[in-house]
Amino acid sequence: MNAKDRPVRGPDGNYGTVDTTCWPSLDEKTEPEVDVHLNDGTHITIPADSLIEQKDGSYYLPLTQKKIDAIPHHPEPEPKADGAWPCREDER
């Protein structure tokens, strides 16, 4: 976890984090999808609109653990269809 990671919680507890390096808040989202780094070390890509920003700076994801488990998990963040990943420091 780094200083730009923000917790992602849901109905079944703490799911992981979102790196906000290139996605500082819901008001400033630049991509329609966001990578969530799960507590088990894997990554999922979800629609940015599915996250609900909380007053404490965390995000609420209204999905149960069972639904998260059904989303394809990847060992690293997945690139967009054009091969680029939106949140790389070297692309800024």
Image: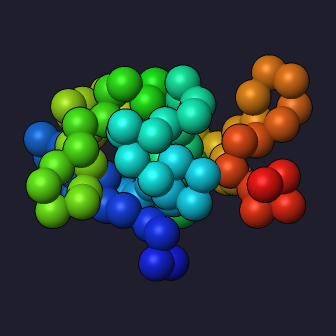
Quarter the C terminus occupies: bottom right
Residue in front for this viewpoint, 48 or 39: 48
- Report the front residue among 90 and 65: 90
Q: Which of 63 and 48 is in front in this view?
A: 48
Check the image and report above or below for 18 versus 44: below
Q: Quadrant of residue 85?
A: top right
Is residue 91 in view? yes
Q: In this view, does 1 lie to the left or right of 73?
A: left
Percent coordinates x, y for residue 56 in the rendering: 15, 62
The residue that appears at 51% across and 59% down in the rendered structure is 19
State the image coordinates of residue 75 (x, y, percent, origin top left): 67, 52
Query: In percent of the image, x 24 and y 60: which residue is there?
Result: 57
Identity of the residue drawn at 76% across and 62% down: 89
Q: Is residue 42 visible?
A: no
Residue 68 is situated, as x and y percent measured from the top left of the image, at 36, 34
Q: In terms of image quadrants, where is residue 60?
A: top left
The answer to whether 24 is drawn above or below residue 89 in the figure is above
Q: Relative to 18, is 52 above or below?
A: above
Q: How many marks?
A: 0
Q: Locate residue 46 relative to residue 89 in the image: left or right.
A: left
Quadrant in the picture for residue 27: top left
Which colour scheme appears in the figure? rainbow
Residue drawn at the location 31% of the way across and 35% of the way down: 51
